[in-house]
Amino acid sequence: SYNYHELGTLQDEEAKKKILERAVVLGEELIERFPDSPQSHKWYAVCVGEFKTGKGAGTKDKIEGGFLFQKHAVRALELDNTDPIVHYMLEKFYYAVAGLSYFERKGAKAMFGLEPPNSTYEDALKSFKDCTRLREKPNVYDYLEQARCYAKMKKKEEAKQFIKKCIDEARDDDPSDMKAKEQANRLLQHI
């Protein structure tokens, strides 16, 4: 059996799809047996998000998967609002949905009869602030994501503050931090 991290390293897309499909079924069974478990809803949201909206998914599946993801991530927070990972997942979801253009939304509605979920950059920022507040130690990506939200909201000074935090706190010996620092510098050039 694969854990979620190992699944991310799996190269065979067909094998990954089968594992995710099975995980979604198991997730549904867990929610049925343990409807008040925040972990059941959290991991179901993760699996359905990967399976329905991941690589190779069609637009209709992505929209349906987005609704399922949002429903179960929100339910997980209703049951336990202290999990920074769920706040992080919702921030990424809200940020992506907020970026859909008017034409993408209307095209999806016309083609599939489904309007994509709604959210704003303010929703994304709130989730990310909650995530950062709940983490034992925020990481540089927390600051980068908040900077991106502020930039999308046209709040340049706030964006610059979080870009500065990201750059200042990035560790030179951590490749992930250096990648975040590079992205922060690029974002700064576009503000």
Image: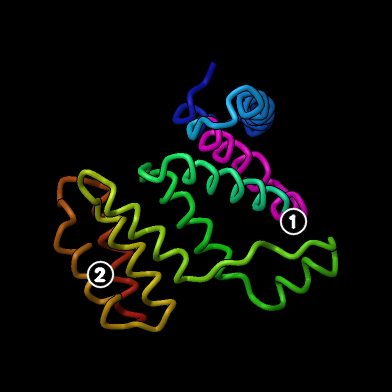
Query: Which quadrant is home to the C terminus?
Result: bottom left
Direction top: furthest residue:
1
- Amino acid beneath label 1: Thr
Q: Which residues are magenta?
A: 40-63
Q: CA distance from mark 1 to mark 2?
A: 33 Å
The picture quadrant where one finds residue 115 is bottom right
Q: Position of residue 1 (x, y in %)?
A: 54, 16
Residue shown at 40% from the left, 66% from the top: 125
Q: Secondary structure at mark 1?
A: helix
- Amino acid beneath label 2: Ile
The majority secondary structure of the magenta stretch comes to helix
Tell me if residue 41 is in the magenta stretch.
yes
Q: Position of residue 15 (x, y in %)?
A: 65, 26
The disc at residue 59 is 1
The disc at residue 71 is none
Task: Kindly identify which residue carries mark 2.
Answer: 163
Residue shown at 47% from the left, 66% from the top: 123
Left/right placement of residue 166 relative to residue 113 reads: left
Is 6 or 100 nearer to us in this picture? Answer: 100
- Identify the image's colour scheme: rainbow, by chain, secondary structure or one colour: rainbow
Total label count? 2
